[in-house]
């Protein structure tokens, strides 16, 4: 058989047609098995459908894989994401085929935020687009830090809360989702900012408030943040210590006359001795009338308004002899509230003590006074003084804190103080929100370099006379410090000065003075400075159980007394344990600083000098006490007992003498020359409340 060679080019296009192949010319018999395979594809597949997407939101920072549910998917379809605003199509970075009803597609990260639909296209060109959309956008991002800081009680609160969306759409709302806001503070918000506004509530101690706020954008995306806001307990940091022996006072002369009919005077005092002028106006010696507030020598409260031209008291109020203010360990808050324009006589002048009205106590005031619209000798162009009278002879002896005058308003005590919710004790509160008037002022005595600085905003500063930086103390109405107690001394040869911290015995006998605070538990620290070494002096603690408080004592070296006796020569300084003298500890010298650590929990008494504990004592570890005290005495009180011509200064944390180093206890209280042993505390009311 002959073979014919046919090349591709030998058969023209369309050379073989159905017309040239007769019906039946090609049969199964003429085709050997396997010689020819014929398949016929019919284009009959239905278009795919999309019924749901497993997510409606994707974070652009991370992207996400979307599960697409539907019908008619053919492996492997093409998937894209369509931006409904711009028309841009984003190719899925990865596509997975699970079945004809389920596929997956990865939305790549870093795309333009917006709303997207899903497009699926099979290999045959048929496709579908979802009706569901995906929000490709981040939840709001907080820019406000979680710690909102601190605000003092009574202060205005105005804190902005800000969160932003990544596509520049507005954060539409802020809402509290957990926790509680401070009472008096509310959350509000508009399209761009949330705000905490109101007034910080009164608190008895620094209080942290924790709460969670949710920011929601216009795409209903949310972001929560937990915030902390601290409301701090307002406190009185300082008082000013006046000593009558040093002629301490402040003065100011107003440049103009303002309201002489309506005013309020508020101050806190802790009197060291009975008697003394707290506040006065006018110059009696120059023929002026005067106004003063003072304590009589017996401790009675007196208010005078005197017209020298008429040689008579316009107004005079005096408490009876049964009502005296002579407790040297107590802080008193006094408010004198005046409005002579009132129609009712009893409304024209009101007196308050520690928040309570005491008008009924004043028995010596003239009937029918003050007359309506009477002018008082105050807020006019005459000298005003704090700590000295109008005759310039009678000085106040003690501590003054928070001195305020309001010019033009008759206020009640609640403008200056409040009742502590835990203890029920009347305490100061911030006056920063008050309106003080032209001649009004507020003296907090916090500036050592300008003790008379006015903090009201009026710049009505006062001139300082004979007071120095050491007279700025931390003995205040909110933290009362121990002092020596003049009521435990009946000997006129004993002089207490500088806020009852300095003791001088100019007599011939041994005389004991107790402190104003005793202890029955806890660990306590104080220091003394020996200022006159002409004779020996006993210093330590004595028992209140002996019944000796309130009467003089010839010698404190008896039962229930634990102390050291300071001597400059043989037998030297030595301990006394219940009247029994111990071995000498070496001589002492003038201006020596002695340290005392009293461990009431373990009945141990430690003493030292100039930074070194006697007998290698270690109060912190409890080793080598100078004296092991009896455990039968429930309360011990610091005492000083001086021989004739002796003197000492006592430091319970707010000294009357200059400290060169400055050390406080673990609670931050006290100003001591030497380090307070670990676990020991200064003797004041805050520490007593916690450890005593």
Image (spheres, rainbow, N blue to C red):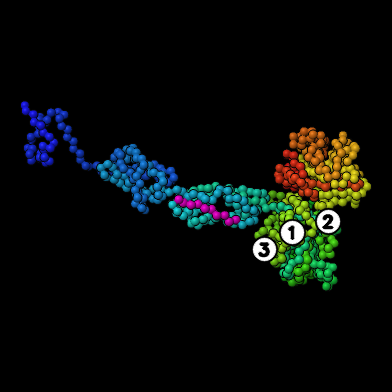
Label 3's element? loop
Would you name the residue on which mark 3 appears?
A: 435
Q: Is residue 621 above or below residue 270?
A: above
Residue that protrudes farthest toward the bottom in the picture: 310
- For the point 45% across and 48% down, which residue is it? 138
Q: Quadrant of the N terminus?
A: top left
Looking at the rendered image, the disc whose residue lies closer to the viewer, 1 or 3, is: 1
Q: What stretch is highlighted in magenta?
A: 157-166
241 left or right, relative to 84: right
Earlier residue among tags 2 and 1: 2
Would you name the residue on which mark 1 appears?
A: 452
Label 1's element? loop
Would you name the residue on which mark 2 appears?
A: 246
Earlier residue among tags 1 and 3: 3
Looking at the rendered image, the disc whose residue lies closer to the viewer, 2 or 3, is: 2
Whether label 2 touches label 3, CB < 8 Å: no
Q: Position of residue 554 (x, y in %)?
A: 91, 44
**Can see residue 138?**
yes
Residue that protrudes farthest toward the right in the picture: 508
Q: In this view, does 589 lie above or below 291?
A: above
Q: How crowded is mark 3: few (under 14 residues within 10 Å), some or many (20 or more)?
A: some
353 left or right, relative to 1: right
Whether label 1 touches label 3, CB < 8 Å: no
- For the point 50% across and 52% down, which residue is it? 163
Q: Distance between the residues labelled 1 and 3?
A: 19 Å
**Can see residue 402?**
no
Q: Where is residue 319 in the image (x, y as percent from the top left)?
A: 82, 61
- For the point 72% across and 67% down, which residue is it? 262
Label 2's element? helix
Earlier residue among tags 2 and 3: 2
Q: How far apart are marks 2 and 3 (CA)?
A: 34 Å
Q: Distance between the residues labelled 2 and 1?
A: 17 Å
């Amino acid at each position: 058989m002959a073979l014919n060679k046919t090349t591709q080019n030998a058969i023209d296009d369309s050379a073989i047609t159905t017309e040239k192949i007769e019906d039946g010319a090609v049969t199964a018999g003429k085709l050997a098995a396997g010689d020819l395979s014929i398949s016929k594809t019919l284009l009959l597949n239905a278009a795919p459908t999309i019924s749901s997407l497993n997510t409606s939101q994707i974070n652009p920072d991370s992207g996400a894989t979307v599960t697409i549910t539907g019908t008619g998917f053919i492996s492997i379809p093409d998937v894209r994401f369509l931006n409904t605003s711009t028309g841009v199509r984003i190719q899925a970075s990865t596509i997975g085929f699970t079945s004809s009803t389920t596929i997956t597609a990865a939305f790549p990260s870093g795309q333009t935020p917006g709303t997207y639909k899903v497009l699926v296209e099979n290999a045959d060109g048929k496709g579908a687009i979802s009706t569901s959309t995906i929000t490709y956008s981040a939840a709001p991002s907080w820019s406000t830090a979680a710690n909102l800081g601190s605000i003092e009680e009574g202060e205005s609160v105005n804190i902005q809360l800000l969160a932003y969306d990544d596509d520049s759409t507005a954060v539409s709302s802020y809402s509290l989702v957990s926790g509680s806001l401070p009472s008096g503070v509310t959350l509000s918000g508009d399209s761009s900012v949330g705000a905490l506004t109101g007034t910080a509530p009164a608190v008895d101690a620094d209080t942290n408030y924790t709460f969670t706020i949710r920011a929601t954008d216009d795409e209903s995306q949310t972001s929560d943040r937990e915030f902390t806001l601290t409301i701090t307990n307002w406190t009185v940091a300082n008082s000013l210590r006046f000593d009558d022996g040093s002629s301490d006072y402040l003065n100011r002369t107003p440049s103009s006359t303002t309201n002489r009919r309506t005013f309020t005077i508020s101050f806190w005092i802790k009197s060291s001795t009975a008697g003394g002028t707290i506040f006065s106006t006018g110059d009696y010696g120059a023929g002026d009338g005067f106004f003063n507030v003072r304590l009589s020598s017996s401790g009675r409260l007196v208010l005078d308004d005197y017209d020298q031209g008429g040689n008579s008291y316009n107004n005079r109020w005096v408490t009876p002899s049964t009502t005296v203010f002579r407790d040297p360990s107590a802080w008193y808050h006094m408010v004198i509230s005046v409005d002579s324009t009132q129609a009712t006589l009893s409304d024209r002048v009101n007196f308050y003590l520690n928040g309570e009205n005491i008008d009924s106590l004043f028995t010596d005031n003239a009937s029918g006074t003050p007359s309506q619209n009477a002018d008082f000798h105050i807020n006019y162009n005459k000298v005003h003084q704090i700590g000295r009278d109008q005759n310039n002879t009678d000085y106040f002896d003690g501590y003054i804190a928070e001195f305020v005058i309001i010019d033009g308003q008759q206020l009640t005590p609640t403008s200056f103080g409040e009742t502590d919710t835990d203890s029920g004790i009347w305490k100061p509160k911030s006056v920063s929100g008050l309106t003080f008037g032209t001649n009004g002022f507020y003296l907090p005595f916090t500036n050592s370099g300008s003790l008379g600085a006015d903090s009201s905003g009026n710049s009505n500063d006062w001139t300082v006379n004979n007071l120095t930086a050491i007279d700025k103390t931390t003995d205040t109405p909110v933290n009362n410090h121990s002092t020596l107690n003049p009521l435990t001394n009946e000997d006129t040869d004993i002089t207490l000065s500088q806020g009852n911290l300095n003791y001088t015995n100019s007599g011939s006998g041994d005389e004991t003075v107790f402190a104003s605070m005793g202890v029955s538990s806890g660990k306590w620290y104080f220091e003394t400075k020996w200022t006159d070494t002409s004779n020996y002096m006993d210093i330590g603690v004595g028992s209140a159980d002996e019944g000796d408080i309130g009467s003089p004592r010839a010698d404190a070296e008896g039962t229930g007394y634990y102390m050291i006796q300071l001597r400059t020569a043989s037998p030297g300084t030595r301990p006394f344990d219940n009247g029994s003298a111990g071995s000498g500890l070496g001589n002492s010298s003038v201006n020596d600083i002695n340290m005392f650590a009293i461990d009431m929990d373990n009945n141990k008494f430690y003493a030292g000098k100039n930074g070194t504990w006697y007998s290698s004592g270690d109060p912190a570890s409890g080793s080598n006490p100078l004296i092991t005290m009896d455990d039968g005495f429930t309360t011990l009180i610091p005492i000083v007992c001086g021989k004739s011509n002796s003197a000492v200064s006592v430091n319970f944390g707010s000294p009357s003498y200059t400290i060169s180093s400055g050390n406080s206890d673990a609670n931050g209280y006290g100003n001591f020359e030497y380090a307070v042993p670990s676990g020991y505390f200064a003797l004041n009311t805050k520490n007593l409340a916690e450890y005593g």
